[in-house]
Image: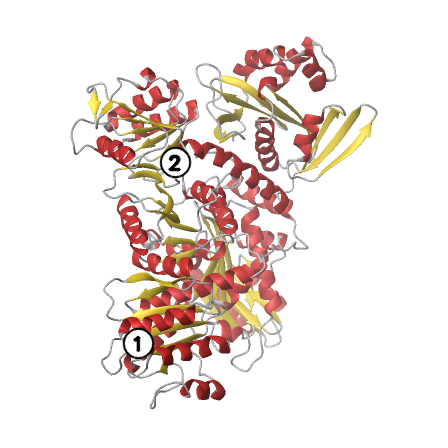
Amino acid sequence: MTDNAEATGTGRSSDGVHALLADGTTARIRPAVPGDHDRVRRFYEEMSPQNLRLRFFAASRRSGQLAADRACAPHRPGHRTLVAEAHDRLIGLAEYERVARTTAEISLAVAEDLHHRGIGTLLLEHLVAAARADGITSFTADALSENHEVLRVFADLGLRTTRRFDGPEVRCTIRLDEDEPYLTAVEARGRAADAASMRALLRPRSVVVVGAGRKPGSVGRAVLRNLRAGHFAGRLYAVNPGATWVEGMQVHASVGALAEPPDLAVLAVPAAQVPAAAEECGKAGVRALLVVSSGLDVHQAGALVAACRIHGMRLVGPNCLGLANTEQDVSLDATFAAARPRPGTAGVAVQSGGIGIALLGGLDRLGIGVSSFVSLGDKYDISGNDLLQWWESDGRTGLALLHLESFGNPRAFSRTARRVTRRMPVLTVDAGRTDAGRRAAASHTAAAATTTMTRRALFTQAGITATRTVPELLDAAALLHAQPLPAGRRIAIVTNAGGAGVLAADACAEAGLDVPPLGPELIGALKAVLPEGASAANPVDATAAVSEEQLRTCLERLTASGAADAVLVALVPTALTSATGDDLVRAALQASGRRSRTVAVVQLDQPAPVRLLDAEDGQVPSYADPQAAARALAHAADRAHWLARPLGTVPELPDVDAEQAVEVVDAFLAAHPDGGWLHPRETAALLSCYGIPHSPWAWADTEDDAVLAAERLRGPDGRVVLKAHWPGVIHKTQQHAVLLDLQGDAQVRAAYRDLETRFSGLLTGVVVQPLAARGTELFTGVVQDDVFGPLVLFGLGGTATEVLADHAARLAPLTDHDVHDLITTPRCAPLLFGLNGTGAVDLEGLEQLLHRLSLMATDLPQLAEADLNPVIARPGGITPVDVRIRLTPRHPKDPYLRRLR
């Protein structure tokens, strides 16, 4: 939303967004403009006397005229009117008027034939977002006590609402805090609306294929063939003005000529025809489009999306393989894939059709199958977030597989994924891991914030299992589908060949799993049932002579002992016993049937990379490669660890002055409209607003200023530091712009002159600081990613921070768990806990620094980069020694506001 809406030739705003109503239909929310006056007046004139009285406390028609005058007046500070419209009809209106510095009074009206469709609630959500951006923290509203509907709308927003009764009237006060209850309520409404809108895509009652060609190899004909061969449960139509019969079906000349408006239209026409075909579908009442056509230019793409928004159609594609739903009472295969998806429990969403075919084939071979499959293609509308919410409530999906090359709204996706992954495993292939775009980064923080690191932070915080390849994804899916999660990372390895055991042990160690030695009592119990010469350490080498019964007993004792969280059985066929390879595998399956531990099998002679073997009460994954099995076990252990952690919380921080911080930012950007690096004075002011400590300093314009500052700032050892400064200076150490260990006035004067000489024409002043006490040099910072939002980084600091690349990252806002992970993930973490014998650093102070940095980045979207390097960590405190902050002009955008892309 913007304060000054651009007007079109009709006098209406061209600004605005589209969002879903409770029934899955689409409405446009936009600011009102003077050209809306007559529509608003008619909107009130069409109200019944009863609704006029509830809205204005009187049934006077004059009230509607006055309301239209106020709502559509030219923009003025402290006032905002939003209108909702659908099919070129004004269906609702909400406005606020500032009555105090942080308080505004609101009003709300909805077309009376459209109540209970979520229009008022959606308008209020957008009004709340606009008011927050305007510095408003609370709404007030007066209503008649008999106006139960509007009072229920206020109460159900999810915001803290209080009521004060005064005779027949009620005054409601609504706090606009963006807290967890409000975000949860917005999510719930969005989830219900999204599911309603997706029914036309994944549970359509009727489908039309537009562009069902006569040529056997045409895409449209292939889609029609698959729909017929799959016995689609609904009504099926075909449209092609140049044909009369295709695939044994009568073909119609246009969508408008059909006996009914289909729920879903599949467009398989040339790119140039897509916009017109979409418009025809919209006018005919189609609810959703699947566009498999490719090659749309920017104008055709814009026209396609515009048609979908104007007519309220959801869109999959373009440039996609299609979609499928294997439910028995739907049986929808609207793809041009060669093979039909096997019914099952995995939900699959991919951007690449080739990846989709590979996943469908792999899930079919494993016997897992799919519940629904959507090829997102260029992803103009329907995204992975929509599919996660569908699978969450479809009653069939137990495993979610994603291949996403891009994210439209990663913060909303993360919230959805965190919720869904507590109900089912969510796996993804981490595509697009290159960092070419970061090579020219200016600051240490920007250089460290690679695309890979950002995506991994998102996946880690959301509990998503991220793999590097499609085969690894299928390996992990097999284990997560078939086996219980391990309670920890301890792996016991049992093998009938010592070499296979060594390979398995190496693979487990490389995957971050623990292969602990077994206790003497357990070793004795295992050796008692194994052939002579067996080794019962870990790995357990049962020898090539082990029988089926011996192996089963060994595994039963091992799983019952509690000495390991999972058992990996590595087998090779031998001729030293009557037990065949299948017999030994059967022993492993029988032992796994008790489900006391996670069990996986490795068969080095197995042709398939992974397959699922039937056990007594389930299945066991069998891998051809120990590394594949180990990686799958590691993914399962990671998921178990994530699920076992309670939900993290974002702490309330004292001594924060967010309003003053906004003033600092606004003042800088007013003087520097294009943004830039803050002066040390402005940097210190902004840090102080968030209670972030920093080393004492002074600014020196002259040599004498530097001497006076040094006298004031010298610590017990009498030494100071001089740092050259000019706008945009970066990497001061590399430019020899930092002079250390200066003692006495003479050294300070000489250092100042040296800087003045070497940086003549650049130097604007010098920063004087006391020499920092010795400690562990750390680095932390923030980068505001245009897509992902603020990313907080932490790790080993100093001049070699980029070379060592010992960093961790999490997306803000940081919970207590996120901060713990940031501190403990880097390789340098043991230094912080006293490994070098000097005692642990001030961990509480370090946690506070990260939390406050996270809050500053979350509050201030204009904060493009913050670079704190080095941060000196000691047992007695945490001190950022050098801090640089860059601001850019950026309007805040609520990532959780309901809107379609």
Q: Position of residue 130 (x, y in %)?
A: 58, 33
Tell which of 177 and 834 is nearer to you.
Answer: 177
Q: Name the front one of labels 1 and 2.
A: 2
The answer to whether 838 is drawn above or below residue 367 in the figure is: below
Q: Is residue 762 visible?
A: no
- State which quadrant residue 351 falls in: top left
Is disc 1 surrounded by few (<14), some (14 to 19) or many (20+) residues within 10 Å? some
Q: Amino acid at mark 1?
A: Leu
> Which of the labelled discs sits on residue 390, or is there none?
none
Q: CA distance from mark 1 to mark 2?
A: 47 Å
Q: Position of residue 360 (x, y in %)?
A: 30, 48
Q: Position of residue 267 (x, y in %)?
A: 29, 28
The answer to whether 250 is drawn above or below residue 371 in the figure is: above
User: For numbered disc 2, what is the local secondary structure?
Assistant: loop
Is disc 2 surrounded by few (<14), some (14 to 19) or many (20+) residues within 10 Å? some
> Which of the labelled discs sits on residue 503, or is there none?
1
Q: Is residue 472 visible?
A: yes
Q: Is residue 803 left or right of residue 39?
A: left
Q: Amino acid at mark 2?
A: Val
Q: Is residue 752 left or right of residue 105?
A: left
User: For numbered disc 1, what is the local secondary structure?
Assistant: helix
**Mark earlier in primary sequence (1, 2):** 2
Q: Position of residue 632 (x, y in %)?
A: 38, 64
Tell which of 626 and 379 is nearer to you.
Answer: 626
> Which of the labelled discs sits on residue 330, or is there none?
2
